[in-house]
Amino acid sequence: METPALVQSASDRYTKVAGPIHTIFVLAILGVWALLGRIIADQMRAAVNPHHVRFYVLTLFFEWLLFVFVVVGVRRSGAPVRIVLGDRWLSVRQVLRDIGIAAAFWLVSTGLLLILGRLLRMAALGRNMDFILPHGAAEITLWLVLSVTAGICEETIFRGYLQRQFIALTESVPAGILLSAAAFGASHAYQGFRMVILIGLYGAMFGILAYWRGSVRPGMIAHAWQDSLSGVLAGVMRH
């Protein structure tokens, strides 16, 4: 009989998955990327025809590089990689279950984001992101690759790894979720201060989902879907 992720042992949920030095390096790398991202974003906003492909490729390279760094760090610490990636799917039923959870989460989180966006007076949210959204079939295709990458890598880094590290460090689940969400928001500083707040709140929702489910896989699906949809809709509307 299969064992749901919800009843996995407490040791899996609260044990550190890497040493403190490794975590400091991860946070430092994220800080550098946030700074570089802000510089690149300012240049793209100022350009008449911003170079989307270069930014997409650079982001792809960075995210997979940090993903590998995190996985290697977890392995070197002796912790099983599944602790940050979630248990493998062993049946179609498990896959469908996580897709269903992801769909429900996406619907609820989208509604909450719309409300939070209004509270933060972010009526110009779409225009704020215009500089980064794809134009044409080639850019949309690359955007989809980037969206799937973001779903896999960012959920592993922020929810699978950092959230567990912060929970272990603070010995508090809420604090761990909030600290990971803050790091997630700060890593998107290139989108502006209000977006950092909104994305941080979005990250907290993903953090709650990951903790409740005991896996980042539903979050990966919802994250990839949300990013993909935003790019495809933008491309279709422009066309």
Image: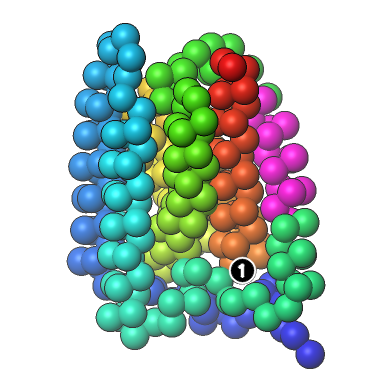
Residue type at mark 1? Answer: Gly
What's the coloring here?
rainbow
Q: Position of residue 73 (x, y in %)?
A: 29, 72
Q: Is residue 107 magenta?
A: yes
Which of 170/92 is in front?
92
The x, y position of residue 168, in whole percent, is 42, 68
Q: Is residue 105 left or right of residue 86?
A: right
Q: Is residue 43 above or below residue 150?
A: above
As drawn, 107 above or below 211? above
Q: Name the residue: 28% across, 41% down.
A: 58
Task: Judge by depth and name the residue closer to the eye, 172 or 138.
Answer: 138
Majority secondary structure in the magenta region: helix
Q: Is residue 147 above or below residue 81?
A: above
Magenta span contains residue 163? no
Tell me the residue at 65%/75% (across/down): 89
* Near-viewer residue (30 or 90): 90
Picture coordinates of residue 224 (x, y %)? 57, 47
* Pointer 1 residue: 214
Q: Quadrant of the N terminus?
A: bottom right
As drawn, which residue projects farthest toward the bottom? 1
Residue ID at (57%, 47%): 223
Identify which residue is drawn at 74% across, 40% down.
108
Q: Is residue 175 left or right of residue 65?
A: right
Query: Hey, which quadrant is residue 231 in on the image?
Result: top right
Quarter of the image with the C terminus in it: top right
In magenta, the rendered stretch is: 101-114
Q: Is residue 23 above or below residue 128?
A: below
Coordinates of residue 40 in the picture (x, y in percent): 25, 27
| 210 lies left or right of 163 | right
Secondary structure at badge 1 equals loop
Residue 141: in sight, yes or no? yes
Number of other residues with Cα within 10 Å of mark 1, as a class: few under 14, some 14 to 19, many 20 or more: many
